[in-house]
Amino acid sequence: MTDVGGCGAVNVASVMPASLKSSLVKSGTARYGSNTETVYELNSINHPLMAATFSDYQVWNDDNITINQFAANHPLFFWEDMFGRIIKFTNDLYIPGAECGKPVIYLYPETKTQVQ
């Protein structure tokens, strides 16, 4: 439920503005116990949130997919929680596999060494 930002996640739950609800369409349902919950997706691949997510993905991935291919894999979906908040989820295909700067390499030379 987090957003990718810099080197890792930038929040615990990605709560979207209530105004986003007008840009969502029902895409399915999810069951939790005896409850059935509605799952939503953006109503257009041209939505700014889709464009931003695609742009972020392109920064760390070089597979050269188009935004249409990206959207076909349902990169984002949304759920309205019991408090009326719209929570954004991101398909794990489109989240970086590791934080920035990994692996970290530690050097312990036994003599004075210049390293670049």
Image (cartoon, rainbow, N blue to C red):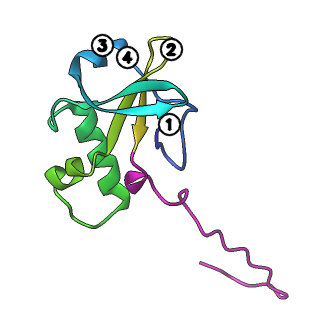
Residue ranking furthest to the right: 110
Disc 4 to disc 3: CB gap under 8 Å: yes
The residues bearing labels 4 and 2 have C-alpha atoms spaced at a distance of: 15 Å
Earlier residue among tags 3 and 2:
3
Residue type indicated by callout 3: Ser
Left/right of residue 115 with respect to residue 41 in the rendered view: right
Left/right of residue 74 with respect to residue 45 in the rendered view: right
Helix, strand or loop at label 4? It is loop
Helix, strand or loop at label 1? It is loop
Earlier residue among tags 1 and 4:
1
Residue type indicated by callout 4: Pro
Earlier residue among tags 1 and 2:
1
Q: Which residue is mark 2?
A: 82
Residue type indicated by callout 2: Met
Helix, strand or loop at label 3? It is helix
The residues bearing labels 3 and 2 have C-alpha atoms spaced at a distance of: 17 Å
Residue 72: image location, x then y, percent = 20, 50
Q: Which residues are magenta?
A: 91-116
Disc 3 to disc 2: CB gap under 8 Å: no
Earlier residue among tags 1 and 3:
1
The residues bearing labels 1 and 2 have C-alpha atoms spaced at a distance of: 16 Å
Instruction: Indicate whether 62 appears above or below 83.
Output: below
Q: Which residue is mark 3?
A: 19
Q: Which residue is mark 4?
A: 17
